[in-house]
Amino acid sequence: MTLTSIQDSGGTANGGDNTGSLAVASTVTVVQNNDEPTLTSNGSNPTFTEGGAAGSLFNGTSISTVEAGQTIKGFTFSVSNVANGINEVINIDGTAIVLTHGTSGSTAGNSLNYSVSVVGTTATVSLAGGTMFTATAQTLIDNMSYQNNSNTPSTSNRVVTLTSIQDSGGTANGGDDTASISVASTVTIVGVNDEPTLTANASNPTYTEGGAAASLFTGTSISTVEAGQTITGLTFTVSNVSDGSSEVIVVDGVAVVLTQGNSGTTATNGLNYNVTMVGTTATVSLTGGNLSAAAAQSVIDNMAYQNNNQMPTTASRVVTLTSIQDSGGTANGGDNTGSLAIASTVTVVANNDAPTLSSTASNPTYVEDGAAVNLFSGTTIDTVETGQTLTGLSFNVSNINDGINEIINVDGTQIRLVDGRSGITSINNLSYTVSVVGSTAQVNLTGGSLSVVAMQALVNGMSYQNNSQFPDTSERVVTLTKLSDSGGVANGGQDASAFTIHSTVSVVQVNDAPTAISLSSDVIRKSNTTGLIGTFATTDVDTDDTHSYSLVTGVGSQHNGLFSITGNLLKPKDLSTIDGGAYSIRVAVNDGNGGRFERTFTISIIDDVATNLNISQLSGNSAADTTLSVSDPAPLATFVLEPIGSETVLSDTVETTTPTFTVRPVVSTSIPTINTTADVITTSTGIAVGLPQRAAVGLGINPAFGFSTANGVGFSTSGDSGAAVLVPSGSDSAISGGGEPGVRVSFGSQALPTNAPSVTPSPVTSPIPGVAPITLVSPIDNQPMGNDQGTNSGDQPGNKNQANPAAAPALGNGGLNINNHSQQANNTVANPNNEPAKQGDNTTGEPATNDTNSQPNDPNKQKKTEAQLQLMQNGLNFNEQLQLVSHRFEIEQLLLLEALEDMLEEPDVVNG
């Protein structure tokens, strides 16, 4: 380099010379080195829309290595505002470089090595190791693009800046292979709505008919993607819908019926629902919501399938979630609806349903003795499932208080409401059992196979009746409680239905007339002082009736006038004016409610007549006991043993003035044994005295008469029968000279007079009306006594003659014939010694009075009793051998001893 001139500022004025010529030369040696490459490019400044394609960053790029033959080794660039992590990507040389710190790798196109470092929100990417021609490098730059894979990208602008380029010239001789550059491209980020997401687990449940709704999904997870958004809707489908309105999806608190056009609003979140049907597939759309993701998850997890059909089709139902929608909208190409295909398959299992029954209660009134009353009508029964039959029916009946009389008529059979009753009905052969607890009967009918029509007829034909003649009037409540069919209980089925259908039966009583009258006694003795014949009682099924009695006119009422009724007591009006005999009366009873019954009674008026007075021995000289007894029964009859006569020789050395005899009771299981040595004392007078007090037991010997008096020794009976024993005492010596004593037995307690010795018997009047006295006479001079014979002409009218032939043959035993009769007659009686007969009705021989017997209701006449006695004895040769003749008592009830004196007004006397 040569300096050739220099010029100053003086100018050339005035010939000046401002330029100096020079020739200063300097030689420069030129050494060549590398120049940094150059790059120019245009930033594209793209807009990246979320979810869209990557945005191209640069275009028109021009690169020079300056020195020919060089290549481009690498680049660096930076990206600002990186906020979405791995979602932020720069696509370069065929590789998407994720803008996260430490990312490294090799590009696909030119095998450039890349590495990423992030400081703050700025990522720096270095590419090295290349051998690219400038044209290749230019293309690489022009193809760079930005991408953000976030569904919610940060919308801050990303600035992508090319910061350096390096060539292969190196840095020798001060060369520079890297050029700093600053070419920027600003990326505008536009966020758009992303469709919500939903995941769930299908429960694939089994729904059993009649069971609870089956849950469809669990573990649901929902996202709106973009924060702050809500779920606005859901769509699902149900396949194989075949049971119409019985098919239901329970969702958001409401049972959505799967029928075409069904719509409404859910209960919990107020979602609008709408159902459309295409074939057998139902599509349900839920819209208008504003649910958080959590609330929407709960809606889906609580979805359930239900089928209310009693015979559901068993094809599986597939419930599929098909879409979900959020509130993000579709602006900038956003998508607010996520498509889904999450299916839950429902297995449908049918089982037996309990049969149904409805019926109208008749609530009838049952009237006693009336026809059975129907309980139910209009019965409708359904087995639900076709082809089934009815197997049983149960019902109960309350307030049963009439036992076997309470009846339910069912299926052609009378079922009596008694505990433990069982049997088979006559129409459909149902087995029935009855159990009663308290006053309620439970009736079970089982074992049937009835059609619906037959069972309806059975229920409609049920009736109540009560056979009691005095039914309890409490209302009977008949309640149908259970019906069973043949469907069984498999899979949780039910073959029996429980219900309470009541029919109330009002029970009305009807008065029943009395059916019988009874009288406690229809006999009265003339000696009766109470005036009571008997007490009336009535047989009447109506136990609360009050009965009244009266004498009424009709068959058998001819003697009503002799009697009266007070309350339920029958009495004679005046017993003293009524003769003994049979009397007919007619009595009616009224129950106070219109019921009446009549009956004729025969009343017997009885004279007190002794019967069956017996003696065990009638002849012979014996020291054995002689027994005196009374039977049939003897009402407190009193016997008096009276000594008659005197100066009887009892032995060779002992002589007394009175006969000797003792009296003691007959020994039996109820009468104490009397020690004859200690208890019976024979004195020198030959009379037993001091009978012990205990001797009165059973036989009833009166101690007051238990000692000898001139009038005899008395003893009596106290029960229905009695006996005494005559015990001879002393020796069996021959009797010589004088009149012989006798022993007389008579009835009654009156004192009897002493009779002087006489060969002629001296009868004593019996104190009991209608009973003749009895005299026992010992033989004279040890000669046989003549037979006393008697005859009885019976009831023939007229006079009766009785004679006693003296020369009749002797007999060893005595006999007695008695005929009691009523007659109009004169009685002529001859004495045993064939003295002239005397006519009369007493012992004095006074003329007899004609005894005229009128009708039994004639109060002025007495019925006469005639006793024909025949006494037959032979060879009596002992001072105490006795002849006893008995009369017969006609006894109906006990006669009190105290009443005897009242009966003594007109005693009948018959000589004997």
Image (spheres, rainbow, N blue to C red):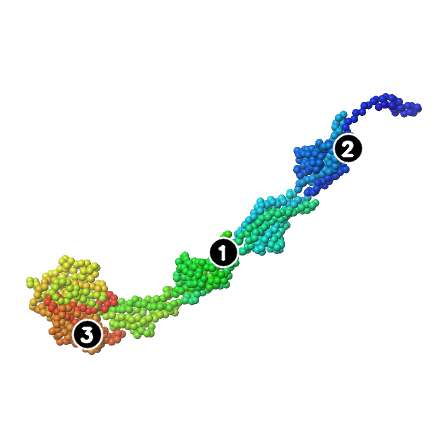
Report which residue position mark 3 lands on.
Answer: 792
Q: Could one spot residue 116 in this view of the protein?
A: no
Disc nearer the start of the sequence (3/2): 2
- Identify which residue is drawn at 16% across, 73% down: 790
Q: Is residue 584 left or right of residue 791?
A: right
Given residues 280 and 898, the one toward you in this image is 280
Instruction: Please say whether residue 377 is visible from this viewpoint.
Output: yes
Contact between labelled residues 3 and 1, with CB atoms less than 8 Å apart = no
- Under tag 1, what secondary structure? loop
Q: In which quarter of the image is the C terminus?
A: bottom left
Q: How crowded is mark 1: few (under 14 residues within 10 Å), some or many (20 or more)?
A: many
Q: Position of residue 829 (x, y in %)?
A: 16, 74
Q: Earlier in the sequence, mark 1 or mark 3?
A: 1
- Which residue corresponds to mark 1? 487
Q: Residues within 10 Å of mark 2 (few under 14, many from 20)?
A: many
Left/right placement of residue 459 relative to residue 858 reads right
Q: In this view, does 260 lie to the left or right of 553?
A: right
Foreground pick, 718 / 44: 44
Residue 804 image offset from top left, x and y in percent: 14, 74
Residue type (three-letter) at the residue carrying disc 1: Gly
